Image (spheres, rainbow, N blue to C red):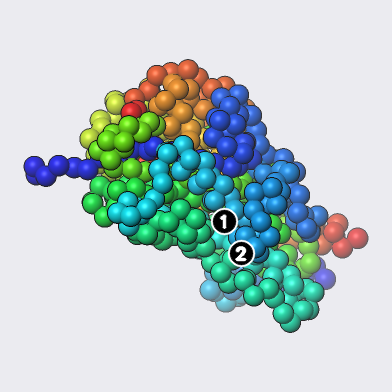
Amino acid sequence: MTRHMRRVVITGQGTINALGRNVPETLRAMREGRCGIGDLEFQDVERLSIRIGAQIKGYEPEASFNRQQIALYDRFTQFTLLAAREAIGQSGLSFSGELATRSGVVLGTSGGGMNTLDENYRTVYEDGKNRVHPFVVPKLMNNAAASHVSMEWNLKGPSFTVATACASSNHAMGQAMQMIRGGMADVMITGGSEAMLCFGGIKAWEGLRVMSRDGCRPFSANRNGMVQGEGAAVFVFEEYDHARARGAEILAEVVGFSMTSDAADIVMPSKQGASRAIVGAMRDAGLNPEDVAYVNAHGTGTTANDKTECAAVADAFGHHADDLMISSTKSMHGHLIGGTGAVELLACIMALREGVIAPTIGYEEPDPECALDVVPNVARDVRVDAVLSNAFAFGGLNAVLALRAA
Amino acid sequence: MSDNIKDRVIAILAEQAMLEPGDISLDQSLEDLGIDSLGLVESIFAIEEAFDVSVPFNANDPTENRDFDISSVDAIIRAVQGLVATQAA
């Protein structure tokens, strides 16, 4: 095939999560190995058996949005807009004319407007009221965040929301990358968001009995479950020549993407499905296993995920697995479910740009079933040229991205 | 009361395993009954609802479940009897 392959680069990044209100704060926390997990604070939390999470404390919508906006924006939409503002601001892009029609938004979320659902169910079921606010539907719908980003920045190209549980953001970013590659768009705003830290959100997760009551310790032998987080991360994906022509600063290149389905079990992960996604992303990127120095793990801190993921990485990388660094930043920012891959991509870009590998904190005891270099507890200074980011969802849907240094 | 607990636990496990209660013997494991990890979590939920108790069970960490032995049908019955005795107080 001689046709020129359109390349995709990242020219902006933004976030809000338990580690920071923006990218510099978040990266500082990751470098320092700081933990964003603490006691949850919201109505009825005393009725939960799981009471910890990586919550954005002291968050005040009124500081960023006016009354009309707050009436329309669920917490997950607010987080998205704040992250998008930082990312698009950094890119220096403004969207009008031809560029507006050649630019779109594809975002991941799993719960969408979960807080809106929770509050309004409480209103009608518990408080017995027969009337809810007129904007409940446009506020809770999963595509609300993507739509508000399109409206705020005049993005008129392909726009939609992906919901594949814990892999939503990676699937979204993979779609964004492929749309630019395939010529459907020149700029895509992408990433993901989640705001599930409310009574109903956590109560539902408690039922599965996979949550930890005391902390997130990925790959550690004494791990006992996942801890949820909240927030968003948003990126500007841009066609390479377009970015070069305007002299934009390129943060990293998105070189590969792969998605697979386990077709096996609704909650238990599969080594084969994960391994095929990892191998597929390297192949799509034209990378050999030896080229990849760092993998940002899915690393949820559950017994099942972490050992299956380590087996998949060993399978996909062969003998190179022993030289690879693999860390789970969920130990710091928690599991953002549909937004997690986006926040984790920040750690990948930090590795490529700054040569700092974010650690797996909370690591206390080696587990023979997770016998890889998990960068325990302390960040590491290593120059790396290519990295992967894993996401493996309930339902057996896997999505892996490959990035290279600019 | 004890026999009642035994019969009700067996009924819960039988429903989950899609078997008749009479086909379940006390020495069988959940694996023998064909109850997988999701089936186990569902059974524990059913036990909590039936007896109004809280079962200390985390699917991640078998050692944390030392207060609730799930190694056989008999073990589960005894664990539930223990919970009912302590938590009903």
Distance between the Cα atoms at labels 2 and 1? Answer: 9 Å
Q: Is B5 located above or below residue A240 in the figure?
A: below
The amino acid marked with disc number 2 is Leu
Q: Which mark is residue A126?
A: none
Look at the numbered disc 2 and give the secondary structure of its residue: helix
Q: Residues within 10 Å of mark 1 (few under 14, many from 20)?
A: many
Q: Quadrant of residue A244?
A: top left
Give the percent coordinates (x, y) of residue B44: 66, 62
Q: Which mark is residue A77?
A: 1
The amino acid marked with disc number 1 is Thr
Q: Which mark is residue A72?
A: 2
Quarter of the image with the N terminus of chain A is top left
Quarter of the image with the C terminus of chain A is top left
Question: Could one spot residue A269 in this view of the protein?
Answer: no
Q: Is A31 located above or below residue A315 in the figure?
A: above
Check if mark 2's residue and mark 1's residue have beta carbons within 8 Å: yes
The residue depicted at 33 percent of the width and 43 percent of the height is: A238
Q: Quadrant of residue A351?
A: top left
Q: Quadrant of residue B37?
A: bottom right
Q: Residue furthest right?
A: B89
